[in-house]
Amino acid sequence: MRKSWSSWWMCFFNDLVQAGIYDLSSEIHKQVMWFCFHDVIQKELDDLARYWNTHYIRRSRYDTISGRPWFNFNHPESHNGSDKGCTVDRQKFDEVKNSVKEGLACYERERAKKNEILQFCDYVSHVHEWNKPESWQYAIEKFEFLCTKF
């Protein structure tokens, strides 16, 4: 399921590039594409994660544990397992935390530049009273329309 799902999206976006609808070198196209498709793709990712984490893994002769992944992860003792979590040195934790903060600050500066495009997309969506796209068909329709406004 995962492979076919991701392959479908890769082919879909590649087809848009090949058809000249999506220009990978255009920052505007990248931002408008994100604006139109992020909710659609996020919903599919959430559905896929929910499916994979709740599907049943059957018993096998290989070194696998049967059951549902979510339950097995949260209750390792049910299969004679144990929680392998470990404590982290506070100094190391703070180093990583500061490093992430620095990276986040850089990310936020870049995002502010792109934010104007997203704000405009949001404005046009509001003016036209659009709902957030829930399908790839609706998302591509909005993408093509918004690209004509730049």
Image: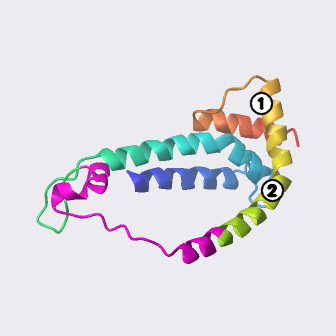
Q: Is residue 5 above or below residue 136?
A: below
SS at mark 2?
A: helix
Percent position (x, y) of residue 43?
A: 52, 40
The magenta region covers 68-97
Amino acid type, residue under disc 1 in the picture: Ser
In this image, 20 relative to 113: left or right?
left
Percent position (x, y) of residue 13?
A: 62, 52
- Can residue 30 be found in the magenta stretch? no
In this orientation, which residue lies closer to the viewer: 39 or 102?
A: 102
Percent position (x, y) of residue 42?
A: 55, 45
Crowdedness near tag 2: few (<14), some (14–19) or many (≥20) residues, C-alpha within 10 Å: few
Q: Which mark is residue 27?
A: 2
SS at mark 1?
A: helix
Residue located at (34% from left, 49% from top): 53
Quadrant containing the C terminus is: top right
Q: Earlier in the sequence, mark 2 or mark 1?
A: 2
Q: How is the image coloured?
A: rainbow
Amino acid type, residue under disc 2 in the picture: Glu
Q: Residue furthest top?
A: 129
Residue 146 position by quadrant = top right
Q: Which mark is residue 125?
A: 1
